[in-house]
Image (cartoon, rainbow, N blue to C red):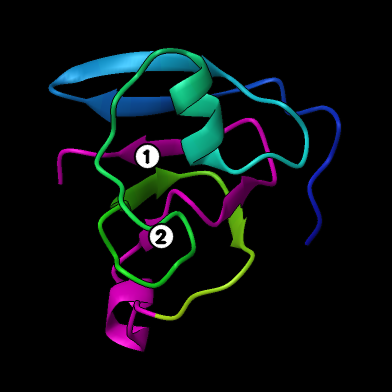
Amino acid sequence: MTATDEVTSFLAILDGVEHLVAYQAGEVLLDCMLAEGLDPAFQCMDGHCGSCMVVRISGDVEMRKNNVLSQRDLDAGYVLLCQSIALNGEVLVDCDA
C-alpha cells in the first residue's frame, strides 16, 4: 500500500476528545497533530522509544520503521504516531488507549 494525495484528514482521540486533524501527504501523523496544536505523548520521534504508541481503530497506515512494537502489539492494532503515514481517509487513532 502507498499513501495517496487524496487523504486530507484523519481522526485522533486525545484526552477523551475526538479531533479532526488536517493531513499533509507523506507526513507522519505525529507531525500533523503537532501542527494542529495538539499535544500527544511522544519523545524520540524516531520509532525507538514507544512513547507515541497509539491504537489504530480504523483505516490503514504504513509505518516508516518500527524498532519497538512487537508482533503482538501490531496484531492488537498499535502503531507509532511518529512513524505512521495515512494510506486512506478512514484513519482513526486512539491516543488515550
Viewer-nearest residue: 74 or 36? 36
- Earlier residue among tags 1 and 2: 2
> What SS does tag 1 mark?
strand
**Range of magenta residues:** 68-97
Q: Specify the quadrant of the image occupied by residue 47.
A: bottom left
Callout 2: helix, strand or loop?
Answer: strand
Residue 91 visible in the displayed image: no
Residue 72 included in the magenta stretch of the image: yes
In the rendered image, residue 85 lying in the magenta stretch gets the answer yes
Which one is in front, 51 or 57? 51
Determine which residue is flagged by label 2.
79
Instruction: Please name the residue that numbered disc 1 is placed on.
Output: 93
Image vertical order of residue 62 relative to residue 55, above or below: below
Q: Residue at image x 78%, y 62%?
A: 1
- State the image coordinates of residue 13 (x, y, percent, origin top left): 27, 27
Q: Label 2 is placed on what type of residue? A: Val
Spatial distance from mark 1 to mark 2, Cα to Cα?
9 Å
Residue 82 located left or right of residue 74:
right
Horizontal side of 85 relative to 31 (left or right) equals: right
